[in-house]
Amino acid sequence: MIVEDAICSFCGCLCDDINVEVEEGKIKRVRHACRLGSSKILGHDRIKAPMIRRGGELCMVSYQEAYDRAAEILLRAQKPLLYGWASTVCEAQKKGILLAEEVGGVLDSTATVCHGPSVIGIEEKGLPGATLGQVKNRADTIVFWGCNPAEAHPRHSLRYSSNVCGRFTPEGRAGRTIVVVDVRETRTSKNADKTVIIQPGTDYEVISALRMLVAGKGDGVPDEVGGVPKAELDGLAKTLLAARFGAVFFGLGITHSRGRYKNIDNALSLVAELNSHTKFVIMPMRGHYNVGGIGQVLAWSSGFPMSVDFTRNAPYFNPGETAACDLLAKADTDAAMIIAADAASSFPRAAVEALAKIPVIQIDPYENPTTLISEVVIPSAIAGVEAEGTAYRMDGMALRMRKLVDTSYPSDEEILSHILESVHRLQRELER
Amino acid sequence: LKAIMISGRTLAQGAGCECKMSPDFLKAVSLCHLSKGDYDALGLCEGKNVQLKNEFGQVVLAPKVDAGLRQGMVFIPMGPWANVLVGPDTGGCGTPQFKGIEVEVEATDASVLEIRDLFRGLRRAQT
């Protein structure tokens, strides 16, 4: 059987033209997907059964035992952290928010080690956005700033941006001007007309200089900014101003560097300034396929897009205090549930050491470093491959992920429902 | 050699990130990309590794020449090896600074730690 036009559940591109060949209930071949997507859809070794750590070793248990132990850990904790959510569907995320409210915890997503600064910057300034379809059909000038889609979003250029032919961009790559701004040359810059190499940590200064040049206040710009000669920046400003429809895509190169959310805030101001002269849009290159979704679901449920503290009477949001790495750094959380993410691999070492000191519940299809520090491990179906649901593309479009094959593993949503049931039962027992 | 470290995705890292316990992931991620100039300045050759250290930790990685990097800058594929060198401070915004980190790089004969060994020292939660 061939499943046509399946949606890839790797990155925020959510490519929706994937053909998947299924034989005897197993995925045999994947067509049209990039190396990242194929690898994910074809699958890897799985966690075989739920486990609880006893005497230092993980021992197989029943799902019910694992749900009950997870519920007990979450209920006993003063301030449990429920972290991850990027590689699962919105239906599971919604259930997770219910659980966080029920047990009085903090729910945070992988955005806080990724585009969290973008989320904050966008909250400050607003996002002059567009759909990827608009970019494909209209953009004649595209800037990739601090991102390397050739390796992180390999089909972005072919489906949505630099190389695709669209309704008003029939020449595709030949009709577009592509600019890369980065601290190094990358595979993406090989496809660019203009590459501007800046010194690490100078994005804010370079953006400020461009804002001045675009606004016609170039007299105040020094001869060199961020290691880039003024003449080169002036040329870049002219390129941007010459666009009829420009798009800026930005990545972790600017969210992870000095300045963090202020870099994004400034980039949004640059785009606002450009919109005084021409049409420009801007978009974060979201990494995990549904990291956008947890932002949406949290925002409509609690009013905040990440790092939401449900331990008070009302949802509370203060990244720097309520984000996962801050909670761990300050020992301000006493248990964690890590779902659809691998915190032990993606957090700074000190945060991982703090995580290893508290009881950790892992919900994931795969063994990974988080498994090594977990007390309870609950294997799940792969959302977007073995379980259906909704995901948000990097441009905020909600798409429906289909189930491609059957599985005996429960979905994230089912696992969370069972843990919620165990929580309710334990609460009733405690009340007696 | 003093250098600025950045971390990020590579194709091999992304393809292996759902099977992190595999030898392929180790090979794809426990790398330190550096310029040819820095590679030569450190006297590196086949079989030699590099040790990177700073105030947050130290880690041994396999060197890889990367023509896209300027001298004084190193790139490590995102993952647990790179994160040994990342500090926990989030500057009040929840996100650690994963890029633009000062590190000291030197040649070493030490081996790259396998993924289980990288986490072996951590105290596991007990029931």
Image (cartoon, coloured by chain):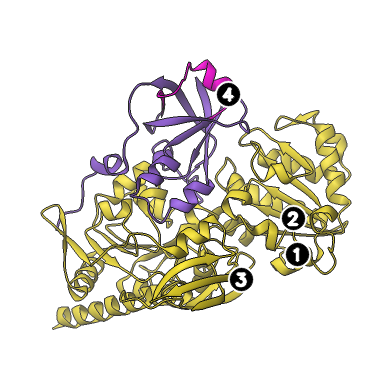
Residue B28: horizontal and vertical position, in percent? 45, 42
Observer-side mark, 4 or 3, equals 3
Q: Marks 4/3: CA distance? A: 40 Å
Q: Nearer the viewer, residue A220 or A35?
A: A35
Residue A418: horizontal and vertical position, in percent? 28, 79
Q: Colour of chain B?
A: purple
Mark 1 neighbour density, 10 Å: few (under 14) some (14–19) many (20 or more)? many
- Is tag 2's residue or tag 3's residue first in the polypeptide sequence? 3
Q: Marks 2/3: CA distance? A: 18 Å
- Is tag 3's residue or tag 1's residue first in the polypeptide sequence? 3
Q: Is any atom of residue B101 visible in this view? A: yes
Magenta stretch, residue numbers:
B34-52
Q: Nearer the viewer, residue A290 or A294?
A: A290
Q: Marks 3/1: CA distance? A: 16 Å
Residue occupied by mark 2 = A162
Residue occupied by mark 4 = B36
- The amino acid type found where label 1 is placed reads Lys
Residue A372: horizontal and vertical position, in percent? 26, 51
Residue occupied by mark 3 = A17
For the residues tagged 3 and 1, is the chain the same? yes
For the residues tagged 4 and 2, is the chain the same? no
From what the image shows, is residue A10 above or below residue A203?
A: below
Q: Marks 4/2: CA distance? A: 30 Å
Total marks placed: 4
Instruction: Label 4: state its secondary structure.
Output: helix
Residue occupied by mark 1 = A136
Image quadrant assignment for residue B122: top left
